[in-house]
Image (spheres, rainbow, N blue to C red):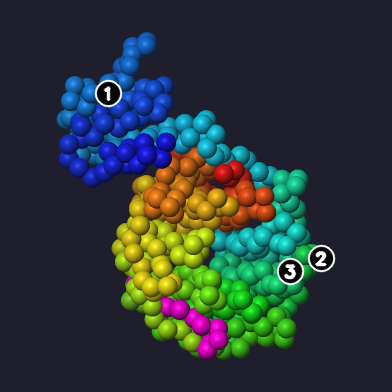
Amino acid sequence: MIVRAARIQSALGAGRRWPTHCARVRSLLAAIDPDGANVVCRKVFGIKSRAGEQVATDTKAAPSPCQHPSRGALARRFKTLRAAAIVVVAAAAGCAGQSRLIPAGSMTIERERDTATLLSDGRVLIVGGDDGVGIVPAIAPAELYDPGTNTFSATGSTSTGRSRHMAALLADGRVLIAGGFGLFGSLTSAELYDPKIGTFTATGLMTVGRQNATGTLLADGRVLIAGGESGQNASLASAELYDPSTGTFTPTGSMTTARQYQTATLLGDGRVLVCGGVNVSGAIRSAELYDPSTGTFTPTGSMTTARQYQTATLLGDGRVLIVGGQNDQVLASAELYDPKAGTFTATGSMLYPREDHSATLLSNGRVFIAGGGNKDWPEMSFTELYDPSAGTFGVGSEMNYARSFHTATLLSDGRVLIAGGFGKKPADTNTGAVLATAELFQP
C-alpha cells in the first residue's frame, strides 16, 4: 500500500505530460480500489463509464479527457485528483486494517493553540488556547480527557486565560504552565496543576514575558524555557530555567540566535536540540544545542533548509526527525539530525507540504503526521506515516475533521488523541472554525 501511494505521488509530480499523468494515476488507483478509481475518473475527468466498465490501465491507450483544458481548469482538476487519490488510498488502507481514526468525545470548549499533557495516571490535561471569541480569546478553563470513558470533563481554571504557552509534566506528577499570550500581551506568570486535587496554583514569575517559546523537561527535573516573543513581535534569544524544588525561574545562557516558533527536543544524552523558528530576518536555518551541565548554547550543524512551524520528533535510535514547516513556501521536505555527527541530512519527503501539523512517535517506531495546512488546503484531514527504517512517508487514514493548530497526544495504550484545532469536516465547503471535536488514531 505504501509503495503504491508513493507511486501515485510520483505520478502527481510536476510535469507537463498531463494525459500520461492522469492515465498513470487511474491505473495505480485501479490496482488498489477499482470502484474508487472509477469514481475518481467520473468525477475528475468527466468519463461516462458504462456498467461494468474497467478503468484503463494502458497509459498510452487510455482516454485523455484532460488534453485540452484551460490552465485554470487543469489546476482545479489536478488539485481534485490529488485529494481523491489520497482519499481512495487512505480508505483502502483503513479497510485493510492498517490503521483507523474513530471519533472521541468532544471537549467542553472549542480550542486551538492549546496544550495537551499526558498525566502519570493516563489522563490528558488540556489547558488554554484560543476559542476565536472576543478581543482576546484566550481560555482559562481547563479539562481532562479520560481514555477509559472516552470523555472530556472540566477541571480547574488557570489564573488567567492564555494561549501559545508552554506546558511540561514534572517529575512529581504536577504540570507546569508558563507564559503565553493573554489579556495584556506576552505573560510572565506561571502556575502548577495538581492532578490529585484538580486545581492550579501560582508559582514564580518568568524573567520576561514569552509566547511562542519552548518548554523542555530536563533529565534533572528542571524545565528549560527558551526563546519566544516578548511583545511587538520581538523574538528572544534569552532562556531561563524553572526549578520545581524552589518554584523559581532563573536566567541561563542565551541562544546564539533570537527565535520564536522553534522546536526544542531533549536528546538521549541530556542536551537539548533547538531548531529553526523565525525572527526579524525571516525563517531560520540554524540549530543549536543546550548543555544543562554548563548552562550554555552552542551552534551545531544547520538544517538543509530554513523552517518555522515545523515539528521535531526524537526517534527510537536517537536521531531527530524534522518535518515540514515553511519559509517562503510551505514545505513537504523532511530531514534527520544525527547527534553523534552533529549534522542534518535529507530524508524522504511527505506526500503533501504542511505546516502547523502534529508529529507523534508511535510505539512501533513510526511517526504519525496529522493535519496542518498549505496553500491548497488551509486545513488538512490527510495523515501520513514515516518509517525510519525505510526513510519514507506513506499514506495514513483520513481524519474525520480537517484541522490545524490541534494537539496530538500518545496515550498509554498506544493510541493517539487528536483534539481541537481550527478546521471543518472534509466535505464542508464553508470557512473553518475553532473545533471542540476529538478523535483517536489506532495504529
Q: Disc 3 and disc 2: Cα gap in Å?
A: 9 Å
- Position of residue 165 in the picture relative to residue 322 (left or right): right
Front label number (1 vs 2): 1
Count of numbered tags: 3
Q: Nearest the camera: 281 or 218?
A: 218
Residue type pointed to by label 3? Gly
Q: Let me know if residue 288 is in the magenta part.
A: yes
Residue 111 appears in the rendering? yes
Which span of residues is magenta-colored? 285-295
Q: Nearest the camera: 362 or 227?
A: 362
Quadrant in which residue 321 is drawn: bottom left
Q: Element at badge 3?
A: loop
Q: Disc 3 marks which residue? A: 173
Residue type pointed to by label 2? Lys
Q: Disc 2 marks which residue? A: 196
When the figure is inspected, residue 222 is found, relative to residue 347, above or below; the finding is below
Residue 1 point in image, percent of width and height: 42, 36
Q: Disc 1 marks which residue? A: 57
Quadrant in which residue 161 is drawn: bottom right
Question: Of the residues under marks 3 and 2, which one precedes in the sequence?
Answer: 3
